[in-house]
Amino acid sequence: MAPFSLMSVGANLLVKSLSLFSSASVVRCSCVAPVIKSFSTSTGGPPKRPLTAYMTYVKEMHPTISRQNPGVKNVDIVRKLAQQWKMLTPEQKQPFQVASSTSREEYKLALEKYKAQLTPAETAALAVEKRQKVAKRKAIRRKKELNSLGKPKRPRSAFNIFMSEHFEEAKGTNMQTKMKSLRDDWERFSATQKQMYIQLAEDDKVRYKNEIKSWEEHMVEIGREDLVRRKERRAIKAKTTKDTKKKSKVTVLKAKSPKKKTGTAVKKTVKTAKSTKK
């Protein structure tokens, strides 16, 4: 892989960005314009959402950086572009922000035009599709959150364990053919051959049951009851309430228990009783 010099690339990017404000700025900005005019309803679908200022910058600069660094991976180029974007001044970012703002305005007009030509059925279908996309994004964000909080992985089935062990050696050149080959092999297995994987799956269920119980108790402790299963939430709350009541009862009993008389106090009591008799 060819070495990627941040200093040299940074200098090139700054020169290119600064040249936007030179006398040839109109010519330089013309390369951003094609990014804006991408809204067409000729395909029958809704117009594409506009790019942000940062994404406009990436789309503009990516080809140049790729040509300058042919051996660098795309993810590394994007990472460097992100770093370079942070280093730009507000004045250097302005052309891309203007392009993004213009793009948003054109998007709004194109979207209104697109919606106006839809039938009621198509409008309803578009609304359903939007809700599905929103739900999908929420599910992805929730999954990331659960992973960051260390939620235990669900138990694997016997077939999943078998598949993970034999996937590399399975016949086929792609995922689909390999999966079909493994499924056929699994179905040909006898009950005795499957027993080992079934036992491993049962062990994994026990592992998950123990881990999820501890994890959910911890979630309740840190105030994230919304991540706990409803049934388990009630059980954990009941257990916590019971433990709290026990502690309160013990505290009350300790407070009410009379103090034991010391030896000196007992002697004084006996002497007082004798003197009274006399």
Image (tube, rainbow, N blue to C red):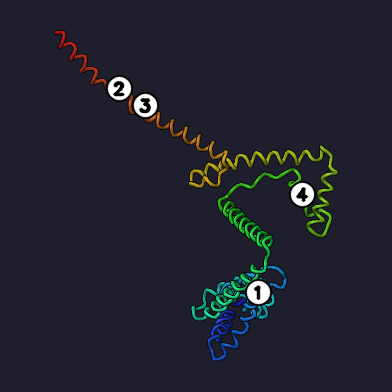
Q: CA distance from mark 4 to mark 1?
A: 45 Å
Q: CA distance from mark 3 to mark 1?
A: 77 Å
Is 152 positioned to the left or the right of 169 in the image?
A: left
Discs 3/2, front:
3
Q: Which residue is mark 4?
A: 163
- The kind of secondary structure element at disc 1 is loop
- The kind of secondary structure element at disc 3 is helix
Q: CA distance from mark 3 to mark 2?
A: 15 Å
Question: What amino acid does circle 3 point to?
Answer: Leu
Residue 66: x percent and y percent?
66, 77
Q: CA distance from mark 1 to mark 2?
A: 89 Å
Q: Which residue is mark 2?
A: 260
As drawn, 86 above or below 230:
below
Q: Residue furthest front?
A: 120
**Quarter of the rendering containing residue 95:** bottom right
Q: Earlier in the sequence, mark 3 or mark 2?
A: 3
Q: Which residue is mark 1?
A: 39
| Mark 1 closeness class: few <14, some 14–19, many ≥20 residues within 10 Å | some
How many numbered badges does the structure rendering display?
4
Q: Which residue is mark 3?
A: 253
Q: Earlier in the sequence, mark 1 or mark 2?
A: 1
Q: Nearer the viewer, residue 64 or 90?
A: 90
Residue 80 visible within the image: no
- The kind of secondary structure element at disc 2 is loop
Q: Nearer the viewer, residue 223 or 169?
A: 223
Q: Earlier in the sequence, mark 4 or mark 1?
A: 1
Residue at (58% x, 42% y) in the render: 229
Q: Nearer the viewer, residue 45 or 176?
A: 45
Q: Earlier in the sequence, mark 4 or mark 2?
A: 4
